[in-house]
Image: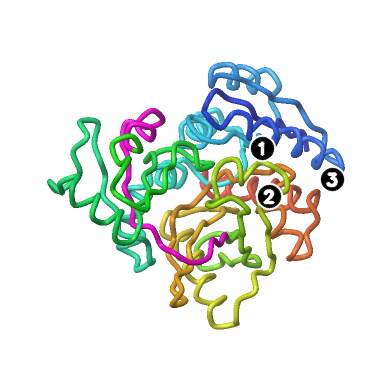
């Protein structure tokens, strides 16, 4: 199998993608695949390279923007080129945090209360900003772009001060902004494998940032966070967390694999924050950690992703 590793792009998550792509290239080589270095900046460049190389599969190691929101997945399907991960619809839904939350709520997946703030700075449902300041002071508020990842543009407020600045920061990455209730407790993430009724969770990971919060720096600077896998949870709590993660994966129609980020309240209730359909594959990334805990070393994990993705594309196309 000749695998074209697509990475780079021009989103704010480019640096993360560069690291993911290099790791995936090496891992696939170790797994015995023939690999093609597909470092690109634009979708046009990517599609031209894919057309020229005509690979067996495109491994998507792009993060954010057109590489993760369903656009490149749609284009590859039209070209008849298999690619890794979920189909266009699931990618589009997962990238939009507001729409994701609506689907979570419809399917009974617990998720924090949130409200969208439009380009004019007005909150959805005519909720005054003063009300959001009160929420920030009472329990904390997370202000983030609706359509971005890697904690880019995210501000955690513990008071009403700085709300407008937080909105401006988030709006610099996405036209739409989400203000979400802060859930105190533990930071967890779960890699989910498969699709539909056959989907299952890999071991839960607890993240303990050495900084105040799990920021971009805490995610991608080696030594800035401690990762416990499996997370030190009792069996009942772990089961609730896994059920919430798998429920979120299913709610969006994800395939092959995803990573679901959650908070676990002091009362032991999990809250789903978001689903990542193209999660990081760097040296500090979480899906590889979960894979190792499940007994899959990195090259085997990549081989499983590649083979399962090829099957998923065949199923979607009916071939």
Which of the numbered marks, if any, corresponds to residue 31?
Answer: 3
Residue holding disc 1: 59
Closest to the observer, 135 or 304: 135
User: In the picture provided, is 83 more to the left or to the right than 266?
Assistant: right
Number of labels in the image equals 3
Residue denoted by label 2: 305
Instruction: Name the secondary structure under disc 2.
Output: helix
Residue 186 among magenta residues? yes
Q: Report the side of 155 relative to 235 (left or right).
A: left
Quick one: 45 or 290, which is closer to the camera? 290
Q: Is residue 246 above or below residue 56?
A: below
Residue 170 lies in what quarter of the image? top left
Circle 1 SS class: strand
User: As drawn, which residue projects farthest toward the left?
Assistant: 126
State the image coordinates of residue 186 (x, y, percent, origin top left).
53, 65
Horizontal side of residue 88 vs 313, given as left or right: left
Mark carried by residue 176 = none
N-term-proximal mark, 1 vs 2: 1
Crowding near pointer 3: few (<14 within 10 Å), some, many (20+)? some
Contact between marks 1 and 2 (CB within 8 A): the answer is yes
**Upstream in sequence: badge 3 or badge 2:** 3
Res. 106 image quadrant: bottom left
Residue 38, image x and y in percent?
Answer: 69, 25
* Rendered location of residue 51, percent (x, y): 63, 20
**Callout 1–callout 3 Cβ contact below 8 Å:** no
Q: Which residue corresponds to the image point at 33% horizontal and 48% vertical from the top-left? A: 99
- Give the mark, 1 or 3, whose residue is nearer the N terminus: 3
Which region is colored magenta? 167-189
Residue occupying the point 12% across, 46% down: 126
The quadrant in which the C terminus is found is top right
Task: Reply yes or no: does residue 128 show up in magenta.
Answer: no
């Amino acid at each position: 199998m000749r695998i074209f590793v697509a990475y780079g792009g021009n989103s704010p998550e480019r640096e993360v993608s560069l690291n993911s792509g290099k790791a995936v290239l090496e891992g696939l080589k170790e797994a015995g695949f023939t690999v093609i270095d597909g470092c690109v900046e634009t979708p046009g460049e990517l599609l031209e390279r894919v057309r020229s190389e005509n690979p067996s599969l495109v491994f998507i190691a792009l993060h954010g923007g057109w590489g993760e929101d369903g656009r490149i997945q749609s284009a590859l399907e039209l070209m008849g080129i298999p690619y890794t991960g979920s189909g266009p619809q699931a990618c589009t839904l997962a990238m939009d945090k507001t729409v994701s939350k609506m689907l979570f709520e419809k399917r009974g997946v617990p998720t924090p209360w949130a409200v969208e703030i439009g380009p004019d700075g007005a909150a959805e449902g005519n909720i005054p900003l003063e009300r959001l300041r009160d929420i920030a002071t009472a329990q904390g508020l997370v202000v983030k772009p609706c359509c971005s990842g890697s904690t880019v543009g995210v501000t955690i407020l513990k008071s009403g001060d700085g709300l407008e600045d937080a909105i401006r920061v988030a709006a610099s990455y996405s036209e739409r902004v989400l203000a979400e209730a802060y859930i105190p407790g533990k930071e967890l993430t779960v890699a989910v494998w498969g699709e539909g009724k056959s989907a299952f969770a890999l071991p839960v990971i607890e993240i303990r940032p050495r900084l105040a919060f799990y920021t971009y720096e805490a995610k991608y600077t080696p030594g800035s966070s401690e990762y416990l896998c499996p997370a030190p949870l009792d069996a009942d709590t772990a089961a609730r967390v896994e059920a919430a993660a798998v429920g979120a994966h299913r709610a969006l129609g994800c395939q092959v694999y995803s990573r679901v980020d959650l908070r676990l309240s002091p009362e032991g209730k999990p809250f789903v924050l978001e689903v990542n359909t193209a999660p990081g594959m760097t040296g500090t990334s979480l899906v590889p950690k979960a894979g190792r805990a499940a007994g899959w070393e990195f090259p085997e994990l990549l081989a499983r992703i590649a083979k399962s993705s090829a099957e998923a594309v065949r199923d979607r196309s009916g071939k």
